[in-house]
Amino acid sequence: MPSGEAAMAQYRQRLLPVFNPALVLARGRGAVVWDADGREYLDLLGGIAVNALGHAHPAWVEAVSRQAARLGHISNLYASQPQIDLAGKLLEITGAGPGGRVFFANSGAEANEAALKAALRRSGTGADQRGRGPAQPGGRGGRILALEGSFHGRTLGALSLTAKPAYRQPFAQFTGPAEFLPAGDLAALEAALADGGAAALVLEVIQGEAGVLPPPPAYLAAARRLTSQHGALLWIDEIQTGIGRTGAWMAYQNPLLGGPLADELDGRPAQAAAPDLVTLAKGLGAGFPIGAMVAMNAEAAGLLQAGDHGTTFGGGPLAAAAALATIQVIEDEGLMARAADLGARWRADLAKAPGVKAVRGAGLLIGIVLERPNAPDVVKAAQAAGFLINATGPDILRLAPPLVLTAAQAERFTQALPALLKETP
């Protein structure tokens, strides 16, 4: 294998410059990775919340290897038992109701494209596959509500729901319309839904790209009540937060994030903010590309019919086997409880570091707000010290490590952070 410097030169000669990778990584084990020159790093980013089981988890490797030796790709002209079993498991852990169904894709953006199509079909703006006009008579005008600070992907459909101007504006003429509401503003949400003309509200329970921003405690319950009251779909993007990341299977199930809490708007008890559509990816495959849209009830499941959407690779046997193994390991090793407990203790410890203004998040999705706007420089200093993290803004560090991270590994970073902040301009 070439040296890191030689490999990076080859990268720049051969790949489009849409990324600027910091390292060439060669191998990993658990929460530790090594670069092409043999240097060791503690991986506190986990492939951006993807590597739920860390690197080379034996059960994951065995499941993927066994499936690869049995049946690899078949397309969706045929079904496989891993695909069927995974769909059942997702309906179970999301808490889907009777009539719920699953659509598999290859990524989070693709899962969101499927959900966007479903929302547009409900809005009455999508014609059926036979060209007979609106799929839903008396449609809702096609208004899709999203939140400021949101990130839902970079494909054109998903990009239309992504608020960050740097991502969206260069392609704005090709994206669909979306109405962006201030995140966490209940009055704005109620006003936007009041006329009954919105087809769907899409939101992240924690906005990762915006700096690991959770909602106010009452927001999820209010979103469920208001969308139900005004006839709109509630679509929750769990791509970064799902599959145990926050200490629950789904962030909308987490009481710390406004799950089964009392609805503070009207005093009535609220159920967990069970949405109509849920989109998943990242941690679902623990490194194997897979995405999923879960239609949580019969109405949502009926929005897309034969010919309305498709994929060649989505939900293939290999990807499904990887996802089933991921879920099984999380259950067997108690990784959700570990994420909840370790995350709470770690956030409290990190908040004590000089130079840290605040720490937020849930489970093992953590945002560290710095007193100075030097987060990108801190990321570089951390890498030099053997830690992989990233910045989501000038003053915000993001941690999304593997769920197998140990308390001792977390403590290593906690102890190193004050010096990293002090030594960084």
Image: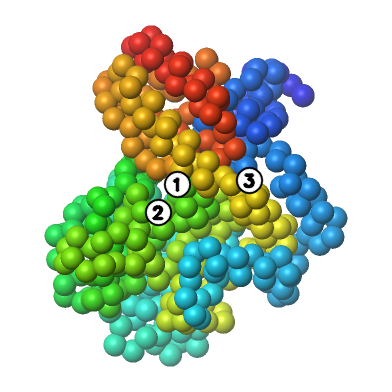
Camera-nearest residue between 314 and 360: 360
216 to the left or right of 236? left
Residue placed at 22% from the left, 69% from the top? 268
Corner quadrant of residue 26: top right
Binning the other alpha carbons within 10 Å of mark 3 as few (below 14), some (14 to 19) or many (20 upward) gives: few
Specify the amino acid type for callout 2: Asn
Find residue 39 and report its horizontal and vertical position in percent: 65, 17
Residue that lies at the very extreme toward the top in this rendered image? 423
Specify the amino acid type for callout 3: Glu
Specify the amino acid type for callout 1: Thr
* Residue at image mark 1: 246
Camera-nearest residue between 21 and 267: 267
Camera-nearest residue between 212 and 124: 212
* Residue at image mark 2: 254
Whether residue 408 is visible here, answered yes or no, is yes
Residue 333 badge: 3
Position of the C terminus, as image quadrant, is top left
Of labels 2 and 3, earlier in sequence is: 2
Measure how far apart labels 3 and 1 are at the Cα level. Answer: 16 Å
